[in-house]
Image (spheres, rainbow, N blue to C red):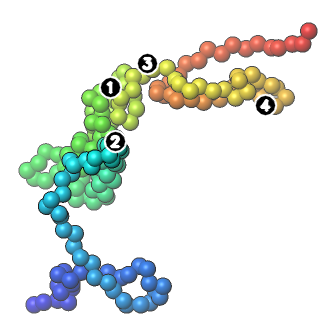
Amino acid sequence: MLFSSDIYIENRFKRDANLEDDDSDDVMEVFPLKLDPSFDPDFIPPDSGTTEFSSLTRESMDHQCFEQIKMYEVFHEPEDFQEVSVVQKIGQLVCPNNCSANGDCNEGICKCNGSYAGIDCSHDRSTPPSNLTLPEQGLCKTSKRACAKTNVYGVFISQTVFAKLEEFKIREN
């Protein structure tokens, strides 16, 4: 027995999203993608610049695909013959920069070893903060704001930062 939905498997159609009339039943044909056998993913055209963006693009695509896979409950359960689920197996492959060999990959997230930090575990925790700035060059004017504490802006590798503050008063002579 042939159902009407079976006919559309060979000739797939979808609504044209660009039509102004939302009540229209106009459809356009969608052709399946075909792989070009002459395509070489490793080919770099001459005078094309660098390929630094490609690793970031790949990481982004890996992460997006992994997020899509995680949405389906069936991929969270291991099969009878497998010890780990599809999500666990793929999650071990999609960590940024493979955790720089300084951490363990779990479901796409790096858990860094003790002395490393960052989303890809590539930064040593002992690295001091960089690009530090203080509001008002660190001076506090009680007429403008309370002086009990101040913000420090910069790039911090570690979540715990220690600072030595020195309090003093400037008086006119």
Q: CA distance from mark 3 to mark 1?
A: 13 Å
Ranked by sequence position, the earlier of labels 3 and 1 is: 1
Residues under numbered marks 2 and 4 in contact, where contact means CB atoms less than 8 Å apart: no
Q: Which residue sits at x=41%, y=90%?
A: 24
| 10 Å crowding of disc 2: few (<14), some (14-19), many (20+) | few
Check the picture and name the quadrant holding the C terminus.
top right
- At label 2, the amino acid type is Thr
Ranked by sequence position, the earlier of labels 2 and 4 is: 2
Can residue 108 be seen in this snapshot? no
Label of residue 126 in the image = 3
Q: CA distance from mark 1 to mark 2?
A: 32 Å
Ranked by sequence position, the earlier of labels 1 and 4 is: 1
In this rendering, position of residue 10 left or right of residue 151 = left
In this rendering, position of residue 33 left or right of residue 14 = left
Residue under label 2, please give it: 50
- The residue lying toward the viewer, choosing from 28 and 139, is 28
SS class of the residue under badge 2? loop
Q: CA distance from mark 4 to mark 3?
A: 33 Å
- At label 4, the amino acid type is Arg
| 10 Å crowding of disc 1: few (<14), some (14-19), many (20+) | few
With respect to residue 155, does 81 lie above or below? below
Residues under numbered marks 4 and 3 in contact, where contact means CB atoms less than 8 Å apart: no
Q: Nearer the viewer, mark 3 or mark 2?
A: 2
In the rendered image, the residue lying farthest to the left is 81
Q: Nearer the viewer, mark 2 or mark 4?
A: 2
Residue under label 4, please give it: 145
Residue under label 1, please give it: 113
